[in-house]
Image: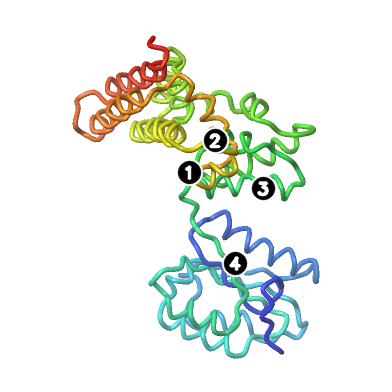
Amino acid sequence: MPRKTANDDPLAPLTLAVGQEDLLLDRAVQQVVAAARAADADTDVRDLTSDQLQPGTLAELTSPSLFAERKVVVVRDAQDLSADSVKDVKAYLGSPVEEITLVLLHAGGAKGKGLLDAARKAGAREVACPKMTKPADRLAFVRSEFRALGRSATPEASQTLVDAVGSDLRELASAVTQLAADVEGNIDEAVVGRYYTGRAEASSFTVADRAVEGRTAEALEALRWSLSTGVAPVLLTSALAQGVRAIGKLSSARGGRPADLARELGMPPWKIDRVRQQMRGWSPDGVATALRAVAAADAGVKGGGDDPEYALEKAVVAVATAARSRQGR
């Protein structure tokens, strides 16, 4: 059959899902299976791990059938296939069988690169499934999930959800689905806070926000809650550092619209507005003092001190005190 190369066709002879984000890999498979079953409800799906695809297995699964049934063959962790199995897959790529869709899940990288290159050369439909390690990536993911469900959520709501739920994409996707199902109208920060109050209050960014706002008691309460729920001390010092640096960046920047400042400082526009509110009590000396306190706490939690919790408490108090330095309080 003619080889399809259109990247938007889930029924192309070969789909190559590349990356290490499990949720996205599973979704790539689900999209192909759904398309195949929409075309033929009796589609046979074979989902194999790399060790299950032994030499000769692929030929057996893709051999012509008297009933000409549609079939989807999924091979997970394709980078771990044996050399003989890789030869089988490469041979198949040269003459794919009609009504069969092969889905290769590959981690990317150097291991198994020969198979990856061969699949791309064969005109595979490729789906990127990168691990989302950056907070900005997870924020973009949450916003795209809301859009996919036809729902509107404020930027602050999306950020609060990421802060509250964490880095697990499955949990983030589940949280978005729950909010979209339960909440009518626009989804804002207050709604997310009500749903995830315990987790949101335990987040490192809540500790930092309360500290840079000069709210010492609330910052210490959030800190103790965070530590009791297992938040790593190094994440707390990182959030404090980010919060103080944002104050310093914005205070030294030229005035302008949030969108212009966002481009200049590398922050989203909504964060510019939030930091503007937080920076009212800060002085340049206060920023310098707070950064030194956070650096000392960071060294303490990374092994330079005997009591990481005490080091964090000192840093939180120092930051909250510095937040009131302009008022001289």
Residue 222, image x, y percentages? 45, 20
Q: CA distance from mark 3 to mark 2?
A: 24 Å
Q: CA distance from mark 1 to mark 2?
A: 9 Å
- Left or right: where does residue 15 sit relative to residue 309? right
- Between 95 and 194, the one lying in front of the other is 194
Question: Which residue type does callout 3 highlight?
Answer: Glu
Q: Residues within 10 Å of mark 4 (few under 14, many from 20)?
A: many
- Left or right: where does residue 113 sit relative to residue 156? left
- Mark 2 or mark 4, whichever is nearer to me: 2
Q: Which residue is mark 4?
A: 127
Residue 168, image x, y percentages? 52, 44
Query: Is the Cβ of the residue at disc 4 closer than 8 Å to that at disc 1?
Result: no
Question: Which residue type does callout 2 highlight?
Answer: Ile
Q: CA distance from mark 3 to mark 1?
A: 27 Å
Query: Is the Cβ of the residue at disc 1 closer than 8 Å to that at disc 2?
Result: yes
Pick the quarter of the image with the C terminus.
top left
Q: CA distance from mark 3 to mark 4?
A: 17 Å
Q: Upstream in the sequence, badge 3 or badge 4? A: 4
